[in-house]
Image: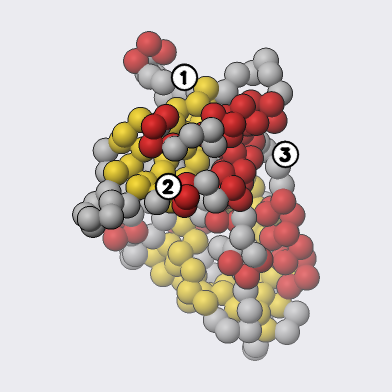
Amino acid sequence: MTDQPPLSTLTLQHRIPGNWAADPWAEVRPLVDGADILGEVHPAGLAPSCRHWRGPAESWPLAVSDEPRRVMITEPDCTAGCCGALYVTMRREGDVVIWDSWENTSDNTHPVPPVMCFDAARYEAELVRAATDRSWEGPLDTAARLLEQTLTDSGWFEQWGCFLTGVWPRRAEPDVPEELTSPEGVDVVFHHVHESGGRGTSYGYELCVTRDEPVEEQVRRFAAHVLADDPRNTAEPREC
């Protein structure tokens, strides 16, 4: 690559969005040389959720290879099709990772970031660090992550013709009186596919997480409750 800009440093920061209605998990926010450059271009954009960093390394949102890949690096809390998103093309050339060909479908009048280059070894080490970072988690996040892993590994829902939709931390809603909202905890949602076809039925558990009991003990109790019987008998039906 000719006229390569100076190498920058990528830092990935877990952050609970202020408006987390679309996804209550933490976003993994990319900072470049310590600055939220993407926020300057797409202020309403959220980085990919930490849930997308739990699979194999090649599936991580910012993973790179020699083959260029167009990535939606921030999106709104609705959908990219509704309010636009920020895209960048990523690739690795030798020992350098390159971000270029920016596209802002939210506001094409706003200048997009310049070409960015990173030392490939440091870049990939930062991806590994972020994917394994648990220091940001509160009890709700830890409980949701451990319970989701336990339920996924169990294969329990499949035995009943169901599939696990997801597990999410349920946070206190700001500016909503306590009596009008559910207590903090974990939501488990699964879906049953009817043999006759159609939309099927969604079910859910609302599990309360306390601050005075070890999270691991609570997760074991939650899992025992879910795995004790046909989950369609113990969960509440939900709107599809």
* Mark 3 in CB contact with mark 2 (< 8 angstroms): no
- Other residues around mark 3 within 10 Å, as few (<14) / some (14–19) / many (≥20): few
**Residue 112, percent from left and from top:** 45, 65
Element at label 2: helix
Residue 151 is at least partly visible in this image: yes
The residue lying at 70 percent from left, 42 percent from top is 134
Residue type at mark 1?
Answer: Pro
- Name the colouring of the figure: secondary structure
Q: CA distance from mark 3 to mark 2?
A: 36 Å
- What's the residue at 73%, 73% (across, down)? 120
Give whichever of discs 3 and 2 has the lower sequence position.
3
- Horizontal side of 239 relative to 18 (left or right) equals left
Please determine whether, in this image, residue 101 is positioned above or below residue 233.
below
Residue 13, x across and y down, in percent? 64, 47
At label 2, which amino acid type do we have? Trp
Mark before the other along the chain sequence, 1 or 3: 3
Q: Quadrant of the C terminus?
A: top left
Which residue is at the front of the view, 139 or 5? 139
237 relative to 58, above or below:
above
> What numbered label is drawn on residue 135?
3
The answer to whether residue 31 shows anywhere in this view is: no
Q: Nearer the viewer, residue 140 or 35?
A: 140
What's the distance in space between the residues labelled 1 and 3, CA to CA? Answer: 24 Å
Label 2 Cα crowd, 10 Å radius (few <14 / some 14-19 / many 20+): some
Quadrant containing the N terminus in the rendered view: bottom right
Q: Which mark is residue 160?
A: 2
Q: Nearer the viewer, mark 1 or mark 2?
A: 2
Dot 1 alpha-carbon crowd within 10 angstroms: few under 14, some 14 to 19, many 20 or more: some
* Residue at (58, 67) in percent of width and height: 59
Which of the two residues, 87 or 151, is positioned nearer the viewer here?
Answer: 151
Residue beneath disc 1: 183
Q: Secondary structure at mark 1?
A: loop
